[in-house]
Image: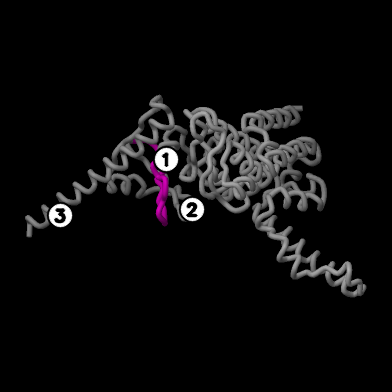
Amino acid sequence: MKKLFSSASAERRKKEKDCFLKNGSSVLEELLALCDGNCRIPIRYYTANEIENAIRHSKSKMELPDVHMVTGLLDNRPVLVRFNRCQFNNIHRDIAITAQMSHLKNGNINDLDRKSLLWENRLRVARDVASAIVFLHTEFTTPIIHRDIKPHNVIIDENSGVAKIVDFSSSISLPPGELEIQDILCGTYGYTDPEYIHQLVITQKTDVYSFGVLLFQLLTGKDVCDIMKRVDSKERIDFEEDAKSNTEEGNSMDRVDSTNSKETTDFKNLPTNYFFDHYIKEGNVVDIADPTILEEHGIAIQQQLKDYFNLARKCTADKGDDRPYMIHVARELSRIEKCFRALSLG
């Protein structure tokens, strides 16, 4: 019996070693490919027991769709341990990219109380995320496209307030010397570049579009999918009212078939800025901004809100060629932030 347990233990250790060598080499390959050999190699090996002990007494946890994260201490260093409820693809690339970016401590944007996101903090979140995307697009051997910029993938340090991007499992590198690459569709409904949806072509402007949607969400304090559902519902009601009105008038030439209208208007395939345009028709930018922003500053920042909204619109232009590059987006956000600080000091 003793020999049986010894044999099983040896087999388990062999599997652990093989797994470590396989995964470790994959991470190393990703690191070398991303940085052309000029990068930090922070590979450390910890047993499952060491990781469990590190997070056993942790009170800092964060729940995301299909994922939960827990902070802990390993070798007296703060770490963030992620548990996935489903199979996690491209884990090696995620580790490699995350290893080149500093870590964080708190929850994502959606977890924060709206009142805690003052206008100053929202601008900082936008600027931090923009800077992180610029880093991805410019600081590696070839540009890295995240492909899934959204609130759930932006987390904020509870002490410094610095925003960070997480989850690089969907990221893809552009080929050397190329401006685009074709790949299967992935991302999140409402945040995905319409050109990418229809042509399966990925460029730096793919992330610009998703970031523009994030800008809009920071401005309104509303989930973009809720806005799209709201406008979608309103449009369908308008179709039905037009049909009813024309039927009552008895004008068969002008009659609207509400059933056919619903079938021919595919709202899910419309770009996000279609919904932005219809949403803002309800009033000007002050009317759609999160009320907590106006409660804090009133109409004194109306011009900043307009500039911010116009930037979000440029980022979500239908065509990628009409969108700015992230470096220009980051500069404009810095300008808006400086204007706000000057106004606050004045």
- Count of marks overlaid on the render: 3
Residue 326 visible within the image: yes
Label 2 neighbour load within 10 Å: few <14, some 14-19, many 20+:
some
**Residue 8, numbered circle:** 3
Q: How far apart are the two marked residues, 1 and 2, measured between alpha carbons? A: 22 Å
Instruction: Name the mark nearer the viewer: 1 or 2.
Output: 1
Residue at 77% x, 49% y: name it. 277
State the SS at label 3.
Answer: helix
Q: Report whether 9 appears left or right of 20.
A: left
Residue 83, relative to residue 73: is it above or below? Answer: below
Q: In which image quadrant can residue 123 be found? A: top right
**Residue 63, numbered circle:** 2
Question: Where does the magenta region start and end?
Answer: 76-92
Q: Report whether 207 appears left or right of 230.
A: left
**Residue 280 is a magenta residue:** no
State the SS at label 1.
Answer: helix
Q: Amino acid at mark 2?
A: Glu
Q: Amino acid at mark 3?
A: Ala
Marks 3 and 1, the one that precedes in the sequence: 3
The residue under label 1 is: 93
Instruction: Name the mark nearer the viewer: 3 or 1.
Output: 1
Q: Quadrant of the N terminus?
A: bottom left
**Residue 155, numbered circle:** none
Q: How far apart are the two marked residues, 3 and 2, measured between alpha carbons? A: 36 Å
Residue at 54% x, 41% y: name it. 156
Residue 181, relative to residue 256: is it above or below? Answer: above
Q: In which image quadrant can residue 334 be found? A: top right
Label 1 neighbour load within 10 Å: few <14, some 14-19, many 20+:
many
**Measured from the top left, where is residue 171 in percent x and y?**
49, 41
**Measured from the top left, where is residue 192 in percent x and y?**
60, 48
